[in-house]
Image (cartoon, rainbow, N blue to C red):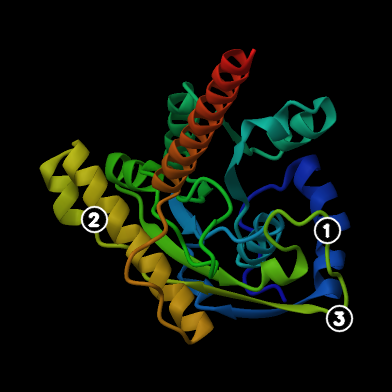
Amino acid sequence: MTVRSLQQPRGWAWTIAVVILKPLLLLLTRRDWRHGERIPATGGVVLAVNHTSHVDPLTTAHLVYDHGRLGRFLAKSGLFRNRFLGFFLRAAGQIPVEREGQGQLAYAAAVEAVRRGECVVVYPEGTITRDPGLWPMTGKSGAARIGLETGCPVLPVGQWGAHLLLGPYASRPDLWPPKTIHVSVGEPVDLSDLRERGLTPETVQAGTERIQAAIVAEVEALRGETAPTERFDLRRARAAERAAREAQEAAEQGQDSSTTIDEEGRA
């Protein structure tokens, strides 16, 4: 369902991807696409999307492509370590994101891509949601920072249904019957007042919150449900898990020490 013809050269990598993947997506999915025309036909733009499945980059890329753009996704660097896949992803203009320490390289590449007029796709959560209800989690600051620095529009995108094709962290897909992929593109998030104040930790945090709230609103509309008042915080959850694990290990060590003392006393 091509809504708008492609406005730029595909290149060989995108040509191969489209020839192979688009027929599969047409076969395995049904599409409920809403407001895709809000994606500008040309010019730099950031799409900020919620993340529920390892396949939702493919279903999102399908929407973006059929609205005349090539998505430049920020993808985890591990995907690029495979020689063949990494070569292919780089040829398709995808941007590797290091988990630790080198995030600035991905940020700089994304800013440069936007300034060249590219459509950059960001998953602010940074990983597939761990929320029990698959609602968007708290977001990282990349999308807001890019929008504030470049002045480009940041469009919130809600998507729902890709998890039925491949569940979060599932090892096997459920390919049949076809799954309906719901995607809604929101109006650009208004960051104008924050841009006037400059790029500071406070404006970045405020922008990040606005973007996440807008994504949640799109997902709520797709699901016909209301999201939890408090978003799942992955960092806080991991810290709690780590503290619980350390407490358990300390308790086990204490029990082992007590057992040793008792045995020595009996001897």
The structure residue drawn at horizontal position 81% and vertical position 63%, both measured from the top left corner, is 22
> Amino acid type of disc 2?
Leu
Q: Nearer the viewer, residue 47 or 174?
A: 174
Q: Nearer the viewer, residue 239 or 58?
A: 239
Report helix, strand or loop for mark 2.
Answer: loop
State the CA–CA distance, disc 2 to disc 1. 35 Å
Q: Nearer the viewer, mark 3 or mark 2?
A: 3
Residue on which the image places disc 1? 21
**Looking at the rendering, which quadrant does residue 239 occupy?**
top left
Which numbered disc, 3 or 1, marks the residue that appears first in the sequence? 1
Which numbered disc, 2 or 1, marks the residue that appears first in the sequence? 1
Q: Do the residues bearing badges 2 and 1 touch, measured as CB atoms within 8 Å?
A: no
State the CA–CA distance, disc 3 to disc 1. 18 Å
**Residue 60: horizontal and vertical position, in percent?**
63, 62
> Is residue 144 placed above or below 260 in the rendered structure?
below
**Residue 177: horizontal and vertical position, in percent?**
86, 81
Report helix, strand or loop for mark 1.
Answer: helix
Q: Do the residues bearing badges 3 and 1 touch, measured as CB atoms within 8 Å?
A: no
The structure residue drawn at horizontal position 17% and vertical position 50%, both measured from the top left corner, is 194
> Is residue 97 placed above or below 233 in the rendered structure?
above
Give the residue at the far bottom of this rendering.
Answer: 224
Residue 191 - label: 2
**Residue 11: horizontal and vertical position, in percent?**
75, 42
Q: Nearer the viewer, residue 206 or 150?
A: 206
Report helix, strand or loop for mark 3.
Answer: loop
State the CA–CA distance, disc 3 to disc 2. 42 Å
> Amino acid type of disc 1?
Leu
Residue on which the image places disc 3? 177
Residue 99 appears in the picture as rendered = no
